[in-house]
């Protein structure tokens, strides 16, 4: 427990007691969401240090992120969102917007500021005739998938169902449908936003287009998204999947598997999404006993199209080396079952640090480096994931959204550390940071916003947004010149003297 952090938050709350009292009296608060997930159920509209519910209210998914806000305000409607933003602007307290609380970087909380919790603003409406959906900020991926799948429709999202849909989408959003249909933010047609001055505005191709361009991948830097509109895709069938595990073997063997994958990816149709990853062989049915505890190189694949074609497209990834094959799982799955496949893989309260770098191609040098970083993982739950881009992601130019990793960027290398012991923080974080630094010695590239570590400031912003950084900072200055939403993003406004 961080006593000084708690005391500092209490001091800030005491300094602004009158404003917080007024806010508490005005908030409707809505109905607490009890969805059986890790999120604590808090029966209050405003929670401050010293309140019995304070520790529950400040809890986020990543146990490595421990922050002490001056207050947590729960919005029951859009008017509450406006009230919180206006209070924050009037007092100079920054706002961290929390929808799902799943931000690995900790952007959904802050020290000494206001957390605006939108988890009670749930709701997904689907118009099957138009192939469209509107999503409120408290909806999770599971909420969106369930509502759209009921009509044989879907939109590309992430892979963990209790993640907040809004935060994931505003940060780009990669998933099993990415190559077929784009990033999550690519399917947006409209965003309704509460800005730093409390104004409600619409951003789309026709209304505030620069803001719309920035919001698609630019995160929570510009305001509070109170409704997202998506253009959906048809998905009225099951999907072909595979998960093939191979003995890692020596470095030359593992590198050979990755080179074979690279060659297959070069000719893959855009419906094919196969991600190699490193894992330790677990005990359990389907794995040979003599391999338990050994390092494996695995290939998780999904095909978004016709399942007959999908099975044919995925089959070569299951036959990379028959002699080294440890487990071969291939089945047709309902899309909802697929989206729940990793539901229990990242428990709340464990510690996480994820960092990425996008690269033009998986060159021989990068293959060898990836194998070395897999071999040097400090813990059994750490992994390196090679996530394919291209396909529909490359249909947009690098400056059409905030995400510059388009066109020539074929894959993203994700270095994902997961552990439980705080004493091991330096080892796991150092491994992930060192891995990205090593890749950048071979070839540089932007990070994905949702996989960009916990670093803040302009250097971190440039590492994510690359050549888009300048115009994004222009948009930030236009819409949030006082940096009210500073805790929710990496961008800062230009200095007023500029």
Image (tube, rainbow, N blue to C red):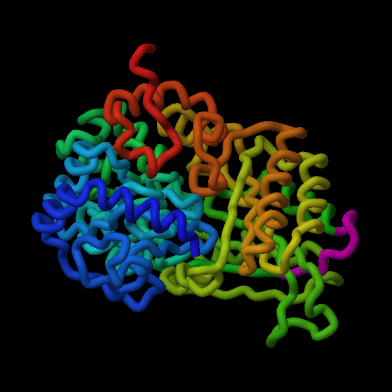
Residue at 79% across, 68% down:
295
Choose between 21 and 432: the one closer to the eye.
21
| Residue 250 shown in magenta | yes
Residue 336 x %, y %: 41, 71
Residue 452 x %, y %: 55, 44
Q: Quadrant of residue 272?
A: bottom right
The answer to whether residue 474 is above or below residue 199 is above
The answer to whether residue 335 is above or below residue 211 is below
Residue at 51% across, 38% down:
456
Q: Is residue 79 visible in the rendered structure shown here?
A: yes
Q: Is residue 97 visible in the rendered structure shown here?
A: no
Q: Which residues are magenta?
A: 245-253
Outermost residue on the left side: it is 26
Residue at 40% across, 25% down:
473
The answer to whether residue 5 is above or below residue 90 is below
Choose between 371 and 348: the one closer to the eye.
348
């Amino acid at each position: 427990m961080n006593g000084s952090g708690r005391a500092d938050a209490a001091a800030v709350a005491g300094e602004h007691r009158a404003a917080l009292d007024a806010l508490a009296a005005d908030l409707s608060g809505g109905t607490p969401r009890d969805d059986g997930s890790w999120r604590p159920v808090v029966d209050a509209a405003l929670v401050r240090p010293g309140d019995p519910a304070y520790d529950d209210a400040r809890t986020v998914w990543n146990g490595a992120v421990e922050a002490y806000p001056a207050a947590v305000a729960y919005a029951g409607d859009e008017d509450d969102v406006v009230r919180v933003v206006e209070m924050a602007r009037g007092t100079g307290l920054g706002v961290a917007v929390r929808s799902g609380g799943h931000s690995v970087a900790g952007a959904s909380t802050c020290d000494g500021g206001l957390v605006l919790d939108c988890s009670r603003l749930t709701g997904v409406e689907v118009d099957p005739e138009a192939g469209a959906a509107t999503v409120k900020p408290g909806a999770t991926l599971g909420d969106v998938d369930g509502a759209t799948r009921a009509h044989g429709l879907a939109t590309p999202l992430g892979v963990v169902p209790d993640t907040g849909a809004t935060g994931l989408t505003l940060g780009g959003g990669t998933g099993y449908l990415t190559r077929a249909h784009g990033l999550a933010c690519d399917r947006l047609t409209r965003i309704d936003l509460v800005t730093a001055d409390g104004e409600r505005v619409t951003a789309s191709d026709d209304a505030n287009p620069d803001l719309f361009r920035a919001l698609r991948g630019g995160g929570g830097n510009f305001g509070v998204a109170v409704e997202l509109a998506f253009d959906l895709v048809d998905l009225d069938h099951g999907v072909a999947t595979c998960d093939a595990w191979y003995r890692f073997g020596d470095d030359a063997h593992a590198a050979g598997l990755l080179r074979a994958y690279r060659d297959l990816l070069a000719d893959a149709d855009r419906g094919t999404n196969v991600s190699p990853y490193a894992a330790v062989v677990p005990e359990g049915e389907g794995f040979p006993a003599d391999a338990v505890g050994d390092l494996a190189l695995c290939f998780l694949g999904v095909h978004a199209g016709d399942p007959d074609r999908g099975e044919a497209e995925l089959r070569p990834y299951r036959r990379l080396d028959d002699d080294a094959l440890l487990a071969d799982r291939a089945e047709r799955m309902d899309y909802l079952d697929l989206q729940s496949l990793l539901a229990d893989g990242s428990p709340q309260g464990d510690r996480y640090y994820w960092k990425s770098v996008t690269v033009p191609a998986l060159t021989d040098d990068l293959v060898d480096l990836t194998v070395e970083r897999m071999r040097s993982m400090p813990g059994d739950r750490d992994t390196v994931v090679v996530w394919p881009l291209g396909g529909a992601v490359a249909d947009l130019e690098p400056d059409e959204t905030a995400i510059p990793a388009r066109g020539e960027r074929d894959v993203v290398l994700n270095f994902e550390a997961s552990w439980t012991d705080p004493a091991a923080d330096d080892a796991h974080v150092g491994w992930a940071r060192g891995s990205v630094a090593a890749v950048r010695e071979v070839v540089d590239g932007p990070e994905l916003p949702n996989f960009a570590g916990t670093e803040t400031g302009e250097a971190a912003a440039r590492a994510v947004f690359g050549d888009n950084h300048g115009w994004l900072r222009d948009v930030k200055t236009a819409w949030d010149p006082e940096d009210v939403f500073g805790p929710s993003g990496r961008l800062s406004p230009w200095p007023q003297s500029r």
